[in-house]
Image (cartoon, rainbow, N blue to C red):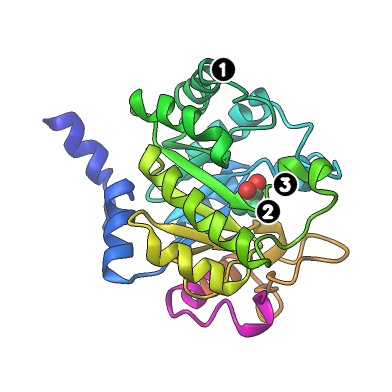
Amino acid sequence: MAMYTQLEQRGMPQPPVNVSTLRKMKAEGEAIACLTAYDASFAQLVDIAGCDLVLVGDSLGMVIQGHDTTVPVTVNDIVYHTRAVARGLRRAFLVADMPFMSYANPDQALESAVRLMQDGGAMMVKLEGGDGQIEIVEHLARHDIPICSHLGLKPQSVHKIGGFKVQGRDNDKASEMVQTARRLQDAGSDIVLLECVPSEVGDAITNELDVPVIGIGAGPSVDGQILVLYDILDITQGRTPRFVHNFQQDYNAPLDALQAYVKAVKDRSYPAPEHCFS
Ligand code: KIV
């Protein structure tokens, strides 16, 4: 049908990325390059640079709004920024974060996900999940909502955890995380995102799952890498996490730095050992 042809091509040399593209990339061993974005101008640059997936992360609470955590971010905030980012993208797959307490039960999760997709234009929603979110993932999947489940360090739980810390260092916790990742996949997650875990845990979960595993501080074996845009462009001031690399330092133009990031993810020169946890 003409409408679908238009959606597939949109006049681009490469068709837009979708969940099948991401699964194929995992199967073929092509690293998936991902970044966050929060506005149309940066989204356009990130897309031109060749990023496969763009996340409107609730990290916007920290890097855009100036909060210390992601907890104050609302569904309205994410919808606003997702709309802007959607206007800047042509090829990259657009994922939006479900903010704190916007998915406390299955019905609320469905309502929030529908807002992010219908009002924001997201193609997938991401939630910070564990075994407690299985029922929610099943409910969303039953309604054909594409889902990314975020495991490892879950920033929305920062006040419960007591800081932004590496997760899964202890053997029992690591094997628990592998089992949880498998259960989230079986419940209907299309992607698992792993934050701040030892490289061996990233490796074990990537081997265990059929769906793509995207890492941030999860070592080199994962199927793709994601970083916060402002961290890699050296906009974030103060101490940045160990996994951050400043890609702007060798370039004048942000687009050059973004292209260097995509290249480093694709040729797997990022992350280097100094960006990884053991
Ligand atoms: O909110 C965010 O930007 C994220 C990334 C750090 C993965 O969840």
Q: Which residues are magenta?
A: 261-278
Residue 8 on the magenta span: no
The answer to whether the residues at label 1 and label 3 have Cβ atoms under 8 Å apart is no
Q: Position of 221 compared to 248: left or right?
A: left
Residue 272 on the magenta span: yes
Residue 26 at what x, y percent from top left?
A: 33, 63
Instruction: Identify which amino acid the numbered label 1 is placed on.
Output: Gln
Q: Is residue 230 above or below residue 6?
A: below
Q: Nearer the viewer, residue 85 or 149?
A: 149
Disc 1/disc 2 C-alpha distance (Å): 23 Å
Q: Which residue is mark 1?
A: 108
Residue 11 at what x, y percent from top left?
A: 26, 47
Quadrant showing the C terminus: bottom right
Instruction: Identify which amino acid the numbered label 2 is placed on.
Output: Leu
Quadrant showing the N terminus: top left
- Identify the secondary structure beneath mark 1: helix
Name which quarter of the figure residue 143 lies in.
Answer: top left
Disc 3 residue: CB within 8 Å of ligand 1: yes
Instruction: Identify which amino acid the numbered label 3 is placed on.
Output: Pro
- Identify the secondary structure beneath mark 3: helix
Q: Is residue 111 above or below residue 87?
A: above
Residue 229 at what x, y percent from top left?
A: 65, 57
Q: Is residue 148 above or below residue 116?
A: below
Disc 3 residue crowd, few under 14, some 14–19, many 20+, Cα 10 Å: many
Disc 1 residue crowd, few under 14, some 14–19, many 20+, Cα 10 Å: some
The answer to whether the residues at label 2 and label 3 have Cβ atoms under 8 Å apart is yes
Q: Which residue is mark 2?
A: 153
